[in-house]
Image: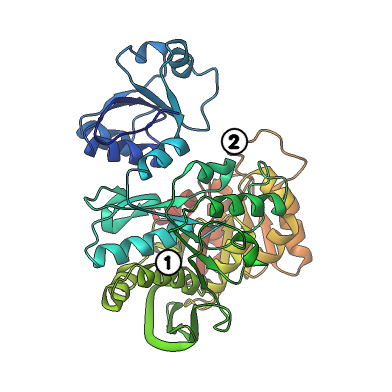
Amino acid sequence: MYKINFNKPANIHFIGIGGISMSGLAEILVNEGFHIQGSDSKESALTDHLSSLGCTIFYSQVGENITDDIDLVVYTAAIKDTNEELVAARAKNIPTLTRAELLGQIMANYKTAINISGTHGKTTTTSMVSEILLAADADPTISLGGILNTIGGNIRVGKSETFVTEACEYTNSFLSFNPTIEIILNVKADHLDFFKDLDDIRHSFKKFASMLPADGMLIINSDIDDCEYFYNDITCKNIITFGSDSTKSKYAPCNIVFDDKACCSYDLMVSGKTIDHITLNVPGIHNVYNSLSAIALSMELGIDMDSIKAGLMHFKGTDRRFEYKGTYNGITIVDDYAHHPDEISATLSAAAKYPHKDVWCVFQPHTYTRTKALFDDFAKALSAADHVVLADIYAARETDTLGISSKDLSDAIKKLGTDSYYFGSFEEIEQFLIEHCINGDLLITMGAGNILKVGEDILNR
């Protein structure tokens, strides 16, 4: 496999350079002196930014873009083998790497490579860790799957030997990485278009944990079912636990309270003793446990509590994570990326403690596979809202409907006793909400697709 060497910058072409992760990796390499070019289907703020850094961007993917002076071609999992640029690269025997392989190669150049994994909570926790490292003047390099306002985007290039990134399990991407420290937040059934079942997912996370070196560190949620399975026979022996039970977790919370915006504060327990009080600036009890993992990492790295608390207080969320969008006729509009039943439950639990009369959840299911596999869980999770409005399923990479629809999900929610509606267009949804939401209601647009447009359109009226 081709090896990235920061001491020998090369000429690299990115197929799909405008993606949030690909553009971030390209920026890291630009800052390390590499010559970067790439292609994408359309111009965007991300491609414009790369152009401003000196990158050459093509807005067509044709074989002529692959010239003989290119040392490496990087492509995403979405690129098909028939892609003209990929075909041309292989014909010229130019080495190729997937995005995940490149990310793994980049982090191998850092002494401390922090990988934050889990079925959900990765972006939020990576952001919390980033804020703490910045507060401690650790000067990290950061790669995020979302936008963090503190760093003005999804990427930050530091000068230290510390690299922090999300580690996604989909298509086993994280098995291409080179971590020295891992956080495992949770392991749930998801991405069942790739994984066979929950046991298959757990097996992948165990393989991920087994990649740690002997002097590495695994920070794991002890609330995960049979969490010992993931580390009982791995080379790394530095196992740090966090979770709800202080008798089986090194790091645990107690005396959790909510403020009037659903943000938590709690007493931090370490090895059974209360050592400090933590205040968060993001809503939801799920963020107590995200923050616990970030605190565990930071304390194990020797970061002082003042920096930890300052970093957590400075973190006010990332884009699309219970993000306040605005107010329309007294209706508070929030957007959230939740697209798994556990995430929906966490978001609606936070919403229940947020100021409101009624909670309206406008949900866009993400992929037919996920909707069908977790159908009953989706219905139960969504039924926690006062009113649910369903948009059509966002197909993403899928073409087979599997005989499932949002209308089916709406009917199932009604059977659970919750007011539920289905509409086939965003325009119908927007008009219905304007007619039925009242002053004081909380409206949450929710999903991993483009459902945020509903709230934005209402605010722009």
Residue 267: x, y in percent? Answer: 43, 86
Residue type marked 2? Arg
Q: Which quadrant holds residue 34?
A: top left
Residue highlighted by disc 1: 329
Labels 1 and 2 touching (C-beta < 8 A) = no
Instruction: Tell me, yes or no, if residue 447 can be seen here.
Output: no
Mark 1 vs mark 2: which is more N-terminal?
1
Q: Quadrant of the N terminus?
A: top left
Instruction: Tell me, yes or no, if residue 243 can be seen here.
Output: yes
Mark 1 vs mark 2, CA separation in Å: 37 Å
Vertical order, 240 against 36 (above or below): below
Q: Residue at x 58, y 39 (%)?
A: 396
Vertical order, 140 against 175 (above or below): below
Residue highlighted by disc 2: 397
Residue type marked 1? Asn
Vertical order, 13 against 172 (above or below): above
Q: Which quadrant holds residue 48?
A: top left
Residue 72: x, y in percent? Answer: 37, 24
Q: Residue at x 55, y 20 (%)?
A: 81
Q: How is the image coloured?
A: rainbow
Residue 49: x, y in percent? Answer: 25, 37
